[in-house]
Amino acid sequence: MKVEAYLINLDGSHERLETASKQLAVQGFSFERFPAFDGRGKALSEFKEYNDEKSVEVMGRSLISSELGCYKSHLGCLEKFLATQADYLIVLEDDIQIIDDQFKVTIDAMLNWLYEHPEIDWYAMNLGAKKNKLSKTVFSFAGRDLVKAYYYPIRFIGTIWTKKGAQEFLNHAAHEMYMPIDNLAQTWLSKNGKGLSVWLPLVKPNGSDSDIDGADATHSIRRNDKSGRQLSYGLKKQTRMWRDRMYAFTNLVRGK
């Protein structure tokens, strides 16, 4: 079994790289720095795959350029992984805070178990879930449960991909951008039922502002900023949430 690990980090974000590297070094966790795509300051028109009309229709707002940079950074990791002989890919963002002293040991144990149980058909595993809803435990190790995450968690701070999962998500996500990548993955994995999660989480955001998911060209609008939202924003958010929960509940009942 071979595992690749990438840490997404913008050129020039030295402090963030150093902070993440120190935590991972304590764990004996080896990784390769992946240079993030810098979307900040770019016009939305520069992203040929971006569909603003569809974004407003689905999200109730336009995306911001840094979100699209984050999106392309994660897809870039998948593309690089698919060109290797590795079985699994661990993708970490550089604002991680490791919250388990056995971070690497737990990941190794869970991947070894999954490698020995190919009947578990999965695409992606979330390492930083904020909540655990509509799930089923399949394996436990050192106080952490590996669960079938029928309602896939939204955070993308730490993710593990299988080869097949990376290819399928790339096929699904690369041709058109209209949702933030974590929202897109949540819907996709809740619908196909091939998401896993670790609960309790192994990592969380360290609280610093994200460099690749930060300000737009004016350096004033961020993802959680309410400016630019349509009046239907709240309704569309609730519609997406209940749709994804329905996908999840259906897969849970089916035992998919």
Image (cartoon, rainbow, N blue to C red):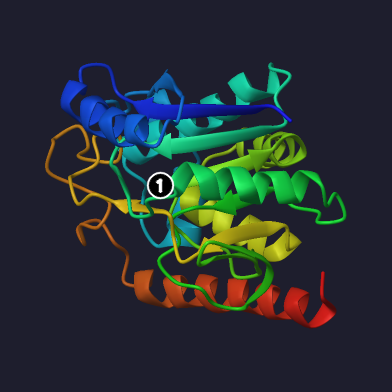
Count the marks.
1
Q: Residue furthest right?
A: 119
Left-right relation of 34 to 198: left
Residue marked by disc 1 = 157
Amino acid type at image mark 1: Ile
Q: Quadrant of residue 40?
A: top left
| Relative depth, front residue between 104 and 148 | 104
- At x 40% / y 47%, what residue is drawn? 157
Where residue 234 sits in the image (x, y, percent)? Answer: 36, 75
Where residue 251 sits in the image (x, y, percent)? Answer: 76, 74
| Relative depth, front residue between 196 and 254 | 196
Q: Quadrant of residue 253?
A: bottom right
Where residue 226 sits in the image (x, y, percent)? Answer: 21, 62
| Relative depth, front residue between 39 and 131 | 131
Is residue 119 positioned above or below 231 on the image?
above
| Label 1: which secondary element | loop
